[in-house]
Amino acid sequence: MQNSTNNEYKAITNEVLFLNDSPLTGVFKVIGGKWKIMLIKAIAAKCPKRFGELKRETNFLSQGTLTTQLKEMERDKLIVREAFAESPPRVEYKLTDLGKTLLPVIDVLEDWYANFQASNKH
């Protein structure tokens, strides 16, 4: 039986693929959180985005999960958080210039998935 693996990828071994300093591993450390890409798109759709708006739009997420994802994205400089000294408190999130560079990447991933779905229809 013939091996169906693409020959062009034959040089990649598990040893290289799963090293902690692999670029792909780094990508998933930054955007690999379950909801991060969705949150980036939500913030980009209306920037700045208030925390309450994000909470309503992601009502399937617990507040703790949402907060954790936002903190990680802020730590990685994908978004910036601005808190206003008002009553009631107001917090807004904006994409940084670095965060904005992910938008075309996300578009490519969405296009890939649309093609994947189309090619797998029976």
Image (cartoon, rainbow, N blue to C red):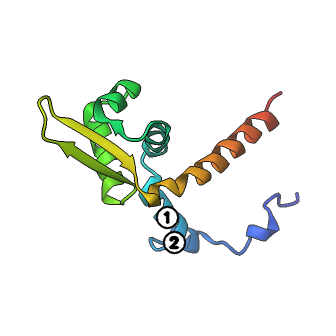
Residue sitting at 63 percent across and 46 percent down?
A: 107
Residue sitting at 28 percent across and 48 percent down?
A: 81
The x and y percentages for residue 25 are 49, 64
Name the residue at the right extreme: 1
Numbered disc 2: secondary structure: loop
Tell me which corner region of the image, top left, top right, bottom left or bottom right, holds residue 120: top right
The N terminus: image quadrant: bottom right
- Amino acid identity at mark 2: Ser
The x and y percentages for residue 35 are 43, 41
Q: Label for residue 68?
A: none
The x and y percentages for residue 80 are 32, 52
Q: Residues within 10 Å of mark 2 (few under 14, many from 20)?
A: few
Q: Residues within 10 Å of mark 1 (few under 14, many from 20)?
A: some
The C terminus: image quadrant: top right
Taking the image as shown, residue 88 lies to the left or right of residue 4, namely left
Residue ID for mark 1: 25
Q: Is residue 121 above or below residue 14?
A: above
Q: Is residue 89 above or below residue 106?
A: above
Viewer-proximal residue among 87 and 71: 87
Residue sitting at 39 percent across and 28 percent down?
A: 58
- Amino acid identity at mark 1: Thr
Q: Say how many tags the image has.
A: 2
Taking the image as shown, residue 55 lies to the left or right of residue 102, namely left
Residue sitting at 66 percent across and 72 percent down?
A: 12
Residue ID for mark 2: 22
